[in-house]
Image (cartoon, rainbow, N blue to C red):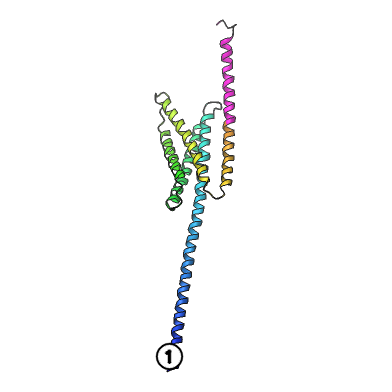
Amino acid sequence: MELVASKNNETEHQKHANTCLHRTAENEVTTNLRSGKGQSFSHGRHHARTAHGILNIIGWGILLPIGVIIARYLRRFPIEYDEWHPLHMLCQISGYILGTVGWGIGLWLGNSSKHYTLKTHRILGILVFAFATIQVLISFLQPRRENECSKWWEIFHQSMGYTVVALSIANIFQGIIHQSHAEKWKWLYVAILALLAFLAAALEIFRWIMKSKLQLPIAFHNNNIYNFT
């Protein structure tokens, strides 16, 4: 009887040990699966943040300023380029599309995280998207040059364009602060802005030189004491 009881006890202990091992294995598998999913989600967020930054820098931060430069310096003066308007629209529409995709990714990143909202960056992003959308819409409503509203439309269009570019640049730097390798991103974009600023400054100087050359003969003609006509 004692032998039978001891055997039964050993069997129960073995079953209990096997059950514990099975549960431990299941817990380990579940933990591994959860950690794997967590790592995969974190990895996906990292790629999404990188895509968000690149698209916004190219769209809002590079193409839009280039479009402004084209409109100011290739329209009529100092350089007259017949195809300036299609080139201007190409930069603006491409920048708007890329920036909107980047903005959408940013909204998803903000909504998927409760502790990583970046309130200032989010508000600036919404303002940039709203103003840029207005800018795109009014570009298709441009009145004819002889229309009295043409002057006011042009003032509003230019003011809105400069506002969008300024807000975009400020928001890009605001977003870079929260990126990994923030210093590298910051100085890379500073270098891009410096290049665009140098190009704009060179064209502006050239514009003033050409303007002064055109005005000099007129001024000389008007002040010529030997001009009796």
Residue 102 drawn at (x, y percent): 47, 46
Report x, y in % for residue 195: 59, 37
Badge count: 1
Q: Position of residue 129 (x, y in %)?
A: 44, 41
Chief secondary structure of the magenta portion: helix
Above/below status of 12 relative to 32 = below
At 43% from the left edge and 92% from the top edge, which residue is drawn? 4
Q: Is residue 215 magenta?
A: yes
Q: Nearer the viewer, residue 219 or 171?
A: 171
| Rendering quarter of residue 213 | top right
Q: Position of residue 220 (x, y in %)?
A: 59, 13
Is 220 colored magenta in this rendering? yes
Taking the view exactly as shown, the residue that stands out farthest to the front is 2
In-image side of 215 versus 130 (left or right): right
Residue projecting furthest to the bottom: 1
What residue appears at the point 57 percent right and 14 percent down from the top-left corner?
Answer: 219
- Name the residue that disc number 1 marks: 5
Considering the image in quadrants, where does the N terminus appear? bottom left
Tell me what residue is drawn at x 53 percent, y 33 percent.
Answer: 69
Question: Which residues lie in the magenta part?
Answer: 201-229
Q: Is residue 224 left or right of residue 13?
A: right
Query: In the rendered image of this protein, does residue 134 appear above or below residue 220?
Result: below
Visible residue check, residue 81: no
Residue at horizontal 47 percent and vertical 62 percent from the top: 37
Name the one closer to the observer, 97 or 161. 161
In this picture, residue 44 sits left or right of residue 188: left
220 relative to 159, above or below: above
Amino acid type, residue under disc 1 in the picture: Ala
- Where residue 11 sits, quadrant-wise, is bottom left
User: Is disc 1 surrounded by few (<14), some (14 to 19) or many (20+) residues within 10 Å?
Assistant: few
